[in-house]
Image (cartoon, grey):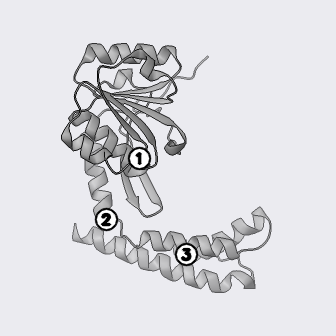
Amino acid sequence: MSTPSPAGFNPLFPVFLKLEQFRVLLVGGGNVGLEKLTAILRSSPATAVMVVATWISPELRALAAPYPRIQLHERPFAETDLENHDFVFAATDDPALHRRIKAAATARGLLTNVADTPAECDFYLSSVVQKGDLKIAISTNGKSPTVAKRLRAMLEETLPEELDTVLQQMTVIRGQIQGDFAAKVKSLNAVTAELTGGPAYESPATRRWRYVATGSLLALGAVVAAAWRKR
């Protein structure tokens, strides 16, 4: 027996896929297909994508040209195109074709994204903010792509590029910490304790790394605060 979800609850399960390890079929070569392919390549440029469409725009051809793992087929969709693929994007202006693609893909156990039809989607594409290794995905449960895009724009403006430097420094610090998992957790807590006003627990080996990380994170906090004051 399933538990009912509270009002306003977003049931989507957030994941970050290594998409280059899968094979993607994109049906549609117009503006919507271009938008989907752009999103795929922005995050996972090594992904194998087969594009099938009765017409493929010059813009999509130009986008695909530098990527050797993208195949372009200018012809009608056939159900055999679904073979040997893991994810499907239906991105045309033909609702009847979308229903056909969705039914055939579901019968084969393939996950499908159907453009502009949230109820038919097995997954959505999120608005993404990226600062180096930091990636933030925003979901509105398919309710409003406009709100998601505006949130993305705000975060892109507010979050400083220096965030990636902080992440790299924290990776170095983590690599320097010795001991078992519990000891490492305590040491990493000590690294950031000064930022929250909590008591610092640390071994002598982590003291100097705490000073390095604290300085970096405090600088980051100052930049973020200054950006918010300007809004």
Q: Dividing the image into 4 quarters, which one contains the N terminus?
A: top right
| SS for callout 2 | helix
Where residue 225 appears, x then y in whole percent?
34, 72
Please state the total of marks drawn on the protein image: 3
Q: Residue sitting at 33 percent across and 41 percent down?
A: 37
Q: What secondary structure is marked by label 3?
A: helix
Please identify the quadrant where the C terminus is shown.
bottom left
Residue 179 at what x, y percent from top left?
79, 70
Residue that label 2 marks: 158
How many neighbours does mark 2 have within 10 angstroms: few (below 14), some (14-19), or many (20 or more)?
some
Residue 16 in sight here: no
The residue where tag 3 is placed is: 169
Badge 1 is on which residue? 68
Q: Earlier in the sequence, mark 2 or mark 3?
A: 2
Q: Nearer the viewer, residue 189 or 7?
A: 189
Up/down of 38 relative to 166, above or below = above
